[in-house]
Image (spheres, rainbow, N blue to C red):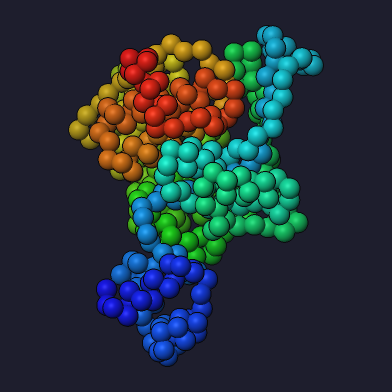
Amino acid sequence: MTRREEEILKLISKNPMISQREVAERLGISRSSVAVHITNLMKKGYILGRGYIVKDKPYITIVGGANVDIIGLPYKKLRMKDSNPGNTTISLGGVGRNIGENLSRLGIDTRLITVLGNDIYGKTIVEEGIKIGLDMSESLILLGEETSTYIAILDEIGDMNLAISSMDIFEQMTISFIQEKKDLIENSTLCIVDTNIPGEVLEYIVLNFNVDFFLDTVSTTKAETVKDMLGYFHTIKPNKLEAEILSGMEIIDNGDLKKVASYFIDMGVKRVFITLGEDGVYYRDRKKELHMKSPEISIINATGAGDAFMAGLAYSYFNGLDTESTIKFSIGASIVTLENENTINQNISVENIEKRIKELGL
């Protein structure tokens, strides 16, 4: 970097919204010279894309869903086709947003790209993101649109029994919109995508952007979207049912797990984590396989466990943890979430996860 480039970068770092004319006036040079220097800084990777996003430290990007969760938990055994006395909560959710909040609470600089309405729910999601350090400034905010909502009915032990999602707003994320985010995404350490975003947009991202992609399949229905593009993902985290949908193979025993995971590896996936609920996690890459059991715990709410697990995977990769440590940390992240009544445990932290891992003898 030249001395002049250092001067310009320092000004932009202090005020990312500064204009080229203001930079020129401050340094006593022409605006055209400033434009040339900024172009060079972008080529060298010190500035990312439009808006002068300065690359000052490693970060993770997420392209996925954000919505409001309405959760119902009955006091007693759930009775279908009847009104069940119980407790209801309203909280912020969405797979991408949940993963992002977990990562932010784990101390990772995280940028979430999603679609929100300019309504009270959308404004609340952005405001909460600011509070917890989750950067949503690159998201698409639509006037006159309603932010996505998700309604879930849990059973008496906290497992999801039925859910309805109203997420049509995500269809308004377009390829032209995501093209503008290429520099931001490619300069991240990794990019997590979930299948709430349109299939054509997801496909465009993995085919045209060069970064390690982590996939969260969200649900068995939405997993169908990515069946033909799995080979472009570095890491995937399906549960048993989603793995069956993606592979077209039934999983009954450990032999089936190995067969299905090998299918994904042969397609080009670098790492496969199949979550098995109380049976733990099955892992496979080209060199090794590992099946780690989960300890017995008291589940209060299972809604956000998968999102916490993915955050654990991303945190571990970001910090260079080995395979066994990665699985332990990710299981630990899901456990501190399972043991909390909220979708996100606001007390999740590296220290609390490591403490719980030690207590449970993982």
Give above or below for 203 relative to 23. above
Q: Residue furthest left?
A: 287
Horizontal and vertical percent for residue 3? 28, 78
When asked about the image quadrant of residue 56, the answer is bottom left
Quadrant in the picture for the C terminus? top left
When asked about the image quadrant of residue 137, the answer is bottom right
Q: Residue furthest top?
A: 77
When asked about the image quadrant of residue 139, the answer is bottom right
Give above or below for 116 relative to 258. below
Position of 61 with respect to 318 (left or right) is right
Q: Residue at x 32, y 31 (%)?
A: 326
Horizontal and vertical percent for residue 348? 48, 30
Task: Depth check: give the residue in front, 202 or 55.
Answer: 55
Can residue 317 be seen by looking at this rendering?
yes
Position of 143 with respect to 181 (left or right) is right
Q: Residue furthest right?
A: 83
Horizontal and vertical percent for residue 307? 49, 33
Position of 24 with respect to 302 (left or right) is left
Give above or below for 312 relative to 121. above
Position of 140 with respect to 195 (left or right) is right
- Across the whole image, how many numbered discs are drawn on residues? 0
Can residue 229 be seen by looking at this rendering?
no
Horizontal and vertical percent for residue 97? 55, 42
Task: Depth check: give the residue in front, 206 or 185.
Answer: 185
Task: Depth check: give the residue in front, 225 or 214.
Answer: 214
Q: Residue at x 39, y 29 (%)?
A: 351
Give above or below for 165 relative to 207. above
Quadrant in the picture for the N terminus? bottom left
Task: Depth check: give the residue in front, 285 or 72.
Answer: 72
Q: Residue at x 69, y 28 (%)?
A: 89
